[in-house]
Amino acid sequence: MTNRIKSAQNALLSWYKKSGRHDLPWRNTQDIYHVYLSEIMLQQTQVNRVLEEYYPQFLKRFPTLQTLAFASLDDVLASWSGLGYYSRARNLHKTAQLNPKGLPDELSALLKLPGIGKYTASAICSFGYNQNVPVVDTNIARVLQRVFAIQKRDEKILWQKAESLLNTKASRAHNLALMDLGSLVCLPQNPKCEFCPLNEMCQGKVNPEFYAKTKKTRYEAMELFYGVFIEDDRIALVNAQGNMYKGMLELPNIDPIEEWHIGNFKHSYTKYRLNVHLYALDEAPFNAVWVDIRAFDDAPISSLTKKAKKFFYKIS
Ligand code: SF4
């Protein structure tokens, strides 16, 4: 190992000691299930939302992998409601059922489990099992691209570079440090290079934006038409069609009839910007699944359907 890499590793660790996010609960646990859960929740969801709205609540309801394995999918999806990307919850549940006594500690075995890709498997090995493996998530990828002046993002090269930079004497802290550096210092726009512990070895600092161009999210507008039928404090829902909300309940999709129109509201879901139209139905759909309005929050219902219910009561 060159002296340049050694001194970069040391600088990174000192920076992490002073400025890293040490108070995140999943960083202060030996429980592999907790580490795994946090990694799944943090995919596509921001740290603060996970921390404040989901992680502690989910663990309270399913404190171990075993309780999760024996829970019904409906209960798991109900606890996931609002987090989006529900395939994560379905895979989490499947993985728990396959390994109720604990997750394997080998990268290759983890990679065979549903919903666990290279990043998640490495994160579990590094953060959970304290193994000497590199980790590359979006934040780390950006740091590496800039440090090694990699013009075009190439996964294979990034993992090789992560390995070459890995501090094998403190790999867990090293990986966490790189992750924090990406989210606190080496920002997509206007990175704070003057405070960066990797400044000396960074080859991309002269033009950092060039090395990790951010792709603009393309949003898709969509019109949705739902029918509402409520009787005796029960609402008629149906099993969701398609993969997006698979396993969950939603309002029935209908062909719009102008006279039945109640109103519309906006909702965002992943890359979709939805305009949701509600219509009053005069009878329940033939395949209705009846849900008591008072038990709405305990059912596997998406935040879109919860919002629709709220909207319906507000305007009717
Ligand atoms: S010097 Fe700047 S561009 Fe390079 S890793 Fe640090 S923050 Fe990122």
Image (spheres, grey):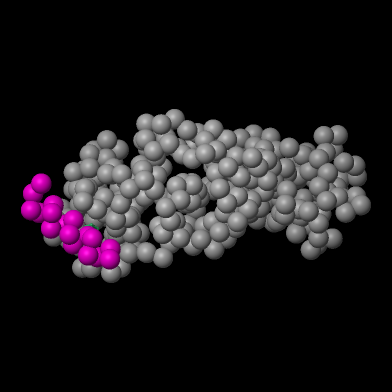
Please state if 66 lies on the left or on the right of 134 as rendered.
right
In the rendered view, would you say 85 is above or below 139?
Answer: above
Please state if 58 lies on the left or on the right of 183 as rendered.
right
Query: Which residue is nearer to you in this view: 74 or 262?
Result: 74
Q: Residue at x 21, y 68 (%)?
A: 194
Could you tell me if residue 132 is visible in this image?
A: yes
Image position, residue 7 (x, y; %): 13, 58
Please state if 1 lies on the left or on the right of 175 as rendered.
left
Q: Residue at x 73, y 44 (%)?
A: 250
Which corner quadrant of the figure contains ligand 1? Answer: bottom left
Most extreme residue toward the front is 101
Query: Which residue is nearer to you in this view: 16 or 71?
Result: 71
Specify the quadrant that holds the C terminus.
bottom right
Q: Residue at x 21, y 51 (%)?
A: 169
Image position, residue 121 (x, y; %): 39, 40
Most extreme residue toward the left is 3
Image position, residue 46 (x, y; %): 47, 57
Q: Main secondary structure of the magenta part?
A: helix
Image position, residue 10 (x, y; %): 17, 59
Q: Which residues are magenta?
A: 1-17
Query: Which residue is nearer to you in this view: 60 or 281?
Result: 60
Please state if 159 lies on the left or on the right of 199 as rendered.
right
In the rendered view, would you say 17 is above or below 114?
Answer: below
Query: Which residue is nearer to you in this view: 224 or 67?
Result: 67
As for residue 101 lying within the magenta part, the answer is: no
As for residue 16 lying within the magenta part, the answer is: yes
